[in-house]
């Protein structure tokens, strides 16, 4: 028992978008990591915020319960409750934060609020191989595309970002143009693996370390309209090559600025984070570029790429050590 009183055991909850997730960490080690993905949105071609909030309400109790059971701990063994404070869908965030606050109040435990994108980056401190500071993190999700210079756990600078769509949106919107269901990113990845890069989409010309994906999307739209006019089965007959070409265009743009950021800052510790870091083409591109440029690369294990609560838990672990707690009157923020 004396061991347990010295441990930092944290229950973490993530509910920012369309995954209800809970994890238990002990001293920064993941004991359990449960994710329940909401399939209902597939019917609508994108996340419907009100449906997401309702699905979180239905899932949160069983998901937390399962995370506690799988961890082998009891509620009484916990030292803190963590939750995603933002950014995200406000209704979804409210479900997770209200639940976390109630539980913290009833167990008389401190509460830790976590920034979703910071959590994606700090997920790199879960595996044995952890990055040294400073490192650059290409953070690519459904809502964000940023190059972040991490100076310390909670000290960072965003040195490049998208001026319009996020990389995940570029994948999902392109997939939609091809008639694929939401979220289309993983499907483009899957079909691209069996295709060749045969179509050239123009690369965005954006200054400095910033990104832009909206022009690429329009480029793909016009290309498809032209081809389908000539052959109405064009998409079906060439799906794998189209996906490989779209994926290649997105990755080239992501890599170009990341390479530039490394050259400009002289930082060779390079990490990848966020849902799009699950993309096999991007993972390979970073590893290959890394070999050529003597980078020390950090690509997260798949379970910590897309939204999960273990990443919230590891961020909360460092916040616990830094005494960064919330009061019970805290509220989530969609644009945190
Ligand atoms: O981080 P995340 O799970 O949720 C947000 O915080 O947005 O990222 C979701 C995004 C979606 O756009 C999804 O299509 C994309 O990540 N994604 C992928 C892959 N897996 C997830 N995009 C390309 N290839 C993948 N394998
Ligand atoms: Zn995310």
Image (spheres, rainbow, N blue to C red):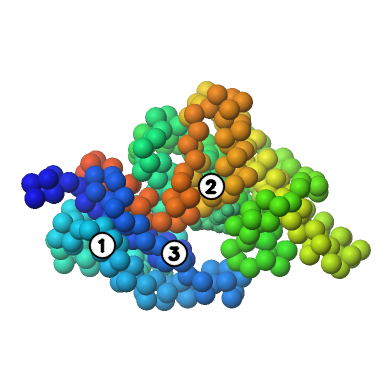
Q: Is mark 3 within 8 Å of ligand 1?
A: yes
| Within-10-Å neighbours for mark 1: few <14, some 14–19, many 20+ | many
| Identity of the residue drawn at 36% across and 34% down | 152
Q: Position of residue 10 (x, y in %)?
A: 24, 53
Disc 1 is placed on an element classified as: helix
**Which residue reaches farthest left?**
2
Residue 297 percent across, percent down from the top left: 50, 33
Tell me the CA gap for discs 2 and 1: 28 Å
Residue 13 on image: x %, y %: 33, 60
153 relative position to 325: left or right: right
According to the picture, the residue beneath numbered tag 2 turns out to be 277
Compare marks 3 and 1 and give the one earlier in the sequence. 3
Q: Position of residue 196 (x, y in %)?
A: 76, 48
Give the secondary structure at mark 2.
helix
Between 314 and 262, the one lying in front of the other is 314
- Alpha carbon distance from label 3 to label 1: 18 Å
Q: Nearer the viewer, mark 2 or mark 1?
A: 1
Q: Which residue is mark 1?
A: 68
Q: Is 121 left, or right, of 228 in this rendering?
A: left
According to the picture, the residue beneath numbered tag 3 turns out to be: 19
Instruction: Give the quadrant of residue 182.
Output: bottom right
Check disc 3 and report its element: helix, strand or loop.
strand
Crowding at label 2, few (<14), some or many (≥20) Cα neighbours within 10 Å? many
Mark 3 vs mark 2, CA separation in Å: 17 Å
Q: Is the residue 120 above or below the residue 292 in the image?
A: below
269 on left or right of 74:
right
Q: Quadrant of ligand 1?
A: bottom right
Is any part of residue 331 visible from this angle? Answer: no
Figure quadrant of the C terminus = bottom left
Disc 2: residue Cβ within 8 A of ligand 1's nearest atom: no
């Amino acid at each position: 028992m004396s061991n347990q009183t010295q441990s930092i055991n944290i229950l973490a909850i993530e509910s920012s978008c369309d995954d209800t997730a809970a994890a238990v960490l002990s001293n920064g080690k993941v004991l359990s990591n449960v994710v329940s993905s909401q399939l209902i949105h597939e019917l609508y071609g994108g996340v419907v915020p009100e449906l997401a909030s309702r699905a979180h309400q239905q899932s949160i109790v069983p998901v937390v319960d399962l995370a506690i059971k799988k961890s082998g701990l009891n509620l009484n063994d916990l030292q803190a409750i963590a939750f995603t404070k933002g950014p995200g869908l406000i209704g979804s965030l409210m479900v997770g934060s209200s639940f976390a606050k109630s539980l913290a109040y009833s167990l008389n435990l401190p509460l830790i609020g976590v920034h979703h994108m910071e959590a994606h980056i700090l997920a790199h401190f879960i595996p044995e191989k952890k990055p040294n500071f400073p490192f650059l993190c290409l953070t690519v999700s459904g809502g964000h595309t940023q190059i972040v210079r991490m100076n310390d756990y909670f000290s960072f600078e965003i040195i490049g970002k998208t001026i319009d769509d996020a990389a995940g949106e570029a994948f999902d919107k392109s997939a939609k143009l091809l008639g694929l269901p939401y979220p289309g990113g993983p499907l483009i990845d899957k079909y691209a693996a069996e295709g060749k890069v045969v179509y050239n989409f123009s690369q965005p010309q954006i200054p400095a370390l910033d990104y832009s994906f909206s022009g690429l999307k329009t480029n793909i739209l016009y290309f498809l309209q032209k081809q389908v006019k000539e052959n109405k089965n064009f998409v079906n007959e060439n799906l794998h090559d189209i996906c490989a070409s779209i994926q290649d265009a997105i990755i080239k743009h992501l890599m170009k600025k990341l390479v530039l950021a490394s050259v400009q800052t002289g930082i060779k510790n390079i990490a990848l984070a966020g849902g799009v870091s699950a993309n096999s083409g991007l993972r390979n591109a970073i590893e290959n570029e890394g070999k050529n440029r003597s980078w020390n690369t950090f690509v997260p294990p798949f379970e910590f790429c897309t939204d999960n609560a273990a990443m919230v838990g590891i961020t909360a672990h460092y916040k616990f050590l830094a005494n960064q707690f919330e009061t019970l009157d805290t509220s989530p923020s969609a644009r945190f």
